[in-house]
Structure formats: structure tokens, C-alpha cells
Amino acid sequence: MNYFQMVGFNGKKNLKLLMGDTSFDNLRMIDKKVLFKRHVEVINLELSYECNRKCDYCPVSFSDRQNSQSYMDSDLIEKICTELSEIRYDNRISLNLYNEPLLDKNLADKISTIRSYLPTAHIGFNSNGDFLRLHLLKKLSHSGLNHICVTLHPLPNVHQDSTMIQRRLFKLLDRLSFDNYTDELNIAFIESNRSFSLYVEGVRIIIQWPDWRREGTNRGGTLDKNSNQKSKRTSPCARPFREFTIFYDGNVQPCCESFHDNKLNLESVGNILRQNIFDLYTSKKLSLMRRSLYDFSEKTGICANCTAEDFSSYSEDESRKKLISEINTSSFSPEINCQTKFD
């Protein structure tokens, strides 16, 4: 079942609103909050900038993120949390995009702040695990962290066999003083599985070892070698419906596949420094983008060659196009322009 099939009560009307239906002009703030609460499943909130690795299947490999650090301003974190507390946001918050969260020495304090505003949200992040130690995990657990997903990334252009993965897995588990694994985590397990899950200090830790060179996305076409440029994307995408993505500087992008740093200039949805979360989520720019991504049709901009997976079935296309045709666009430009790169 895909995201659109799971849309619940009053789903079609809400979807039309999220795709720019002007029959319901002058949405009240309460309406915008309801749409956000009902449809956003994860908030990507990047609290810092730097990553210590340069994986060859990640755009950080050619970015200044490898040797430059910046942090989201504490006042901005509080602004975001205050707005989310107005709807009692209780879904997922992921504290990473293209950064390594554990490089931030004040991460635990920031998690405590988020938890104080959003007591029922599920807070987690992805990490390479290089800096994960038991004493730090205890601190993060006390601050209100729910989970960490650790990926055992290989070195650039190095193939990681099962023996190497097992050795790295054992080393990480030893650092966490978790020793109840010897019999289960044999080579056969490594070869037939892609992850191992455990709880330490009340935090769920998922350790995974997928082959991102083969299975990863091209990050909105940013990674040419991970992209088949001859193949145009036609499949739908639910990410701008179900995600809300905020980078370290307050820049809001349509989804986590958009890469943002100090050099790459992508058109943004807006900036949370100057705008309200709920206004941005229901903005004309994001609404038009969602409409262009709802059905099976050729995509444009950074979506044109994006390889992010979608689980929609082509059998739904007729009904999707019918819903789009019902959208009142009298005050909207007919042109649908996905996010585009600037020279």
C-alpha cells in the first residue's frame, strides 16, 4: 500500500488542497495546521552542516561539508519547535540530512529542547557511527532520543565483503558494551540480511550495511554516475506530501533528496527564518510541485532524473489524473515548475 492509498478521512479534498485547489482560497491557519498534522509523517531537521566522510555515492564527496561546520541557530530550533507544538506534532523527526549529527557536541542539549516542546514525537537520526560510544549514547538517551540508524559505510571506492562488515559490526557493538551477539551475527547472517537491531540504554539502534552504490538514489540527479540520464522519471512521488525538510540554515527544500550546501544553488521552497512552517507547507510553490508529482507523467527540474523509489501502481493513473483535472486553478499559473538548478 502506498502513501496516497493510506490517506484517511477527507483524503481527496485534502490532496486537492495540497495540490493548489483555489476553490478553497484564503485557507485559515487552522486549516493549514490540520493539513500538516494529517499528512506529514516525517520532519527532516538538519541541526548541523559537517560530515566527516566523503562516500563516493553521496554529494558530500564534492562539497565543502567535509571540512566546514555550521549549526542551526538555537532561536530557530525553538521557533520550529514552538510552531510544531501548536499542533502537538507526534510523528517522526529525523535530525540529519547530509551531516553527521554526532559531530555536534551540543546535540544532546538540542534534543532535550526538542523533547521539551514535543514530548510525544519520535526523535532519531542516521549516523555513520564513527563517534558513537556508550557514554555518549547514555547522554543522548537521557535527552530524549528514540533511535539511531547506523550505516556501515565503506571507504571511497572500496568493496566491503561480509567478513569486513562482520568485523566492523563487532567493533561497534564492543564500543557499546553489547556482547550478546557472537552466535547470531555469523557470516551467513551478514550475507542473508542487511541490518541488525538492538536496544542499548533504551535507544533503538539499527545497524545496516546496504550496498548504496547499487541501491542508492542519485540525490535528485546530483550524482550523475548513479543516474541513467537517458531515462526520464515518469513515476509519482509522495515525498513533498509526507516530508517537510529543513536544512541547517533554515532553507526549506521539497524533500530529503534535494542536496543543499554553500555552493550548490537550488531554488528553495522558502526559509523558516522568515516564514511559518504551515504557510510554507501549503505554499503555491510546493503545491504546484506536488501536483506535478502526483500522477504518471514526465517530471522536470531536479525531479527529471531522480531515482527515488515510489510504490504507486500505474493502474491508479487514470483516477489520479481525474483528481488533478478537478482542481480549481483559476488564480494559479498553469505552468508547473519543479525545483530547478541555477547556474
Image (spheres, helix red, strand yellow):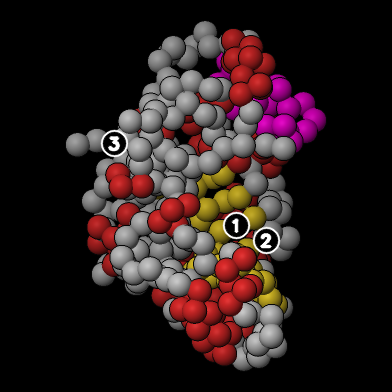
Q: CA distance from mark 3 to mark 1?
A: 27 Å
Quadrant where the N terminus sits is top right
Up/down of 147 relative to 22, above or below? below
* Element type at mark 1: strand
- Residue drawn at point x = 40 percent, y = 56 percent: 213
Specify few, some or many for label 3: CA neighbours under 10 Å numbering under 14, 14-19, or 20 or more: few
Q: Is residue 103 magenta?
A: no
Q: Position of residue 94 (x, y in %)?
A: 56, 59
Residues under numbered marks 3 and 1 in contact, where contact means CB atoms less than 8 Å apart: no
Q: Does the magenta stretch mainly form a helix, a strand or a loop?
A: helix
Using the image, tell me which numbered label, if any, was put on residue 2: none
Q: Position of residue 216 (x, y in %)?
A: 45, 52
Asked which quadrant contains residue 253, the reply is top left
Do we see residue 331 in this rendering? yes
Q: CA distance from mark 1 to mark 2?
A: 6 Å
Specify few, some or many for label 1: CA neighbours under 10 Å numbering under 14, 14-19, or 20 or more: many
Determine which residue is flagged by label 1. Answer: 93
Counting residues from the start of the chain, the first of labels 3 and 1 encountered is 1
Q: Mark 1 is on which residue type?
A: Ile
Determine which residue is flagged by label 3. Answer: 341
Counting residues from the start of the chain, the first of labels 2 and 3 encountered is 2
Q: Nearer the viewer, residue 256 or 74?
A: 256
Identity of the residue furthest to the front in this view = 188
Residues under numbered marks 1 and 2 in contact, where contact means CB atoms less than 8 Å apart: yes
Determine which residue is flagged by label 2. Answer: 122
Q: Mark 2 is on which residue type?
A: His
Q: Position of residue 262 (x, y in %)?
A: 26, 54
Start and end of the magenta stretch? 4-22
Counting residues from the start of the chain, the first of labels 1 and 2 encountered is 1
- Residue drawn at point x = 55 percent, y = 85 percent: 170
